[in-house]
Amino acid sequence: MPESSDLMLGGLSPDEAEREIYQHIISRNPEHSFEPTLDRVRDVCALLGDPQHAYKVIHLTGTNGKTSTARMAESLVREHGLRTGMFTSPHLSSVRERIQIDGEPIAQEDFIRLWTEVAPIIHLVDAKSIENGGPRLSFFEVLVVLAFAAFADAPVDVAVIEVGMGGVWDATNVADGDVSVIAPISMDHAQWLGDSLAGIASEKAGIIKPGAATIISEQSEAVLPVLIGAAAEREARVQWEGSDIEVVERQPGVGGQLVTLRTTAATYTDIFVPLYGDYQASNALLALAAVEALMADGGEPAALAGETIETGFGNVTSPGRLEAVRTSPMVLVDAAHNPAGIDALVGALEESFTFKSLVGVVGILEDKDAEGILAGLEPALDHVVLTASTSPRAMSTDDLEAIATPLFGEDRVTVASNLPDALDRAVQIAERDHDMGAGVLAVGSVTLISEVRILMRADERKGTGQAR
């Protein structure tokens, strides 16, 4: 694979150029493989003029809920007439989804132009790191740098930035969050962040900046002392869910839920949030409090206009979060990939859907808690079809079957060697006893649901599916 500055993009079509750039980026260390240093990202940013300081920042961490909260916060900020950037991960279809301007993935031509401008700087820092015995910038570090540069280039007024993993050593932490948001913390990425909740919380608390506004969701008792200590040490202006802010009331409805949210500035009644589950109501609360704090610019938060709130929340989408990608039968995809996420998903399913038969298509990555994920899904599924995505990190179906069979029983477990077959089998099983009210849920890893969404879109183009 050629070095950054040696990529030959001339003469390629835009699609070919984007693929070439992406292939180069993914040839680097993956985003879950990183060294505890921000030096490389700082060095590139310094050579680019520190673009991460050119706009206000809402910085988000946590184990589950970051992306949905980021999307809601971005929509609310944009509804104020401000230009927005948003950096989230992972992507579902195109890497450009990770870098959004005004709610849309960065344009292909801008992505290619940005790469040609930034790549020589990345190459310089790569060479310096290698000379000192270190690695090149990782996959994730490169994308973070591109996002910061894209936001300054746009230019945006506010960037909503989601960490990749952790906080202290996450590449996004070279930015200074005007507002930090900490979503619920549970066990995940233990290989890299530590095998205790307190240790993971200490990593994630690293995004809290001195004197900055900080919004913290309800947390477990193991996590609270760590966050309290970090916030006090940095003299952060903290708002805690459950005391300072709260979801007062929520009522599930068609296409989402009506919520009443109390912040330090106001109580907002009957706000429609087009997402399912009590956790999405909490995510909406975090996003609302974060935007109030941002708009206050260091002062006391004031109430936001009702019309702005209604439109901002009403326009929110969260692809891959209990998303219907087909009807007849309904096929849902959800990015839950750890036990806490599965528990939240199952609660939302029970509350908002009335399937007579629900079959799961489940694929899990090797570094995840497969037993915890499958045990959490068991009460919600009539049958499970085990498969694997194309990810090299995908757990084998043999290993999944060995875990699933004691939980579900042999009669409720099917194995499919590839995803198209898994979906076909799941639909057949779901519709076997129920022509109406049958459903399929694809879950277990982001790579799996990404591939399901691509397959469903391909079926729609061929006229063989009924995508919603």
Image (cartoon, grey):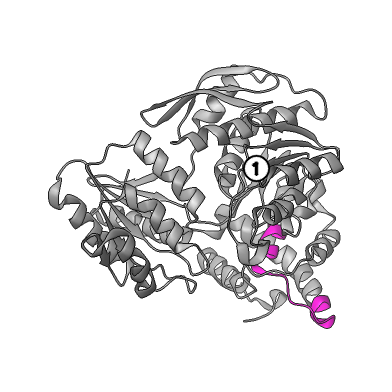
Q: How crowded is mark 1: few (under 14 residues within 10 Å), some or many (20 or more)?
A: few
When the figure is inspected, residue 321 is found, relative to residue 249, above or below; the finding is below
Read off the residue under disc 1. 221
Residue 285 is situated, as x and y percent measured from the top left of the image, at 60, 30
Residue 227 is situated, as x and y percent measured from the top left of the image, at 74, 44
Residue 158: image quadrant is top right
When the figure is inspected, residue 40 is found, relative to residue 49, above or below; the finding is below
When the figure is inspected, residue 159 is found, relative to residue 112, above or below; the finding is above
Whether the magenta-drawn stretch holds residue 141 is answered as yes
Total count of labels? 1
In the image, what residue occupies the spot 14% across and 45% down? Answer: 435
Residue 181 left/right relative to 109: right
Which is nearer the eye, 77 or 447? Answer: 447
Residue 60: image quadrant is top right
When the figure is inspected, residue 191 is found, relative to residue 461, above or below; the finding is below
Three-letter amino acid code at disc 1?
Answer: Glu
Range of residues picked out in magenta: 127-146
Q: Can residue 47 be seen in this view?
A: yes
Q: Which type of secondary structure does the marked residue at label 1 adopt?
A: loop
In the image, what residue occupies the spot 80% across and 67% down? Answer: 40
The prevailing secondary structure element of the residues shown in magenta is: helix
In the image, what residue occupies the spot 41% across and 40% down? Answer: 347
Which is nearer the eye, 152 or 229? Answer: 229
Whether the magenta-drawn stretch holds residue 257 is answered as no
Q: Is residue 320 visible?
A: no
Which is nearer the eye, 179 or 128? Answer: 179
Quadrant of the snapshot with the N terminus? bottom right
Quadrant of the snapshot with the C terminus? top left
Residue 395 is situated, as x and y percent measured from the top left of the image, at 43, 71
In the image, what residue occupies the spot 59% across and 35% down? Answer: 75
Which is nearer the eye, 294 or 151? Answer: 294
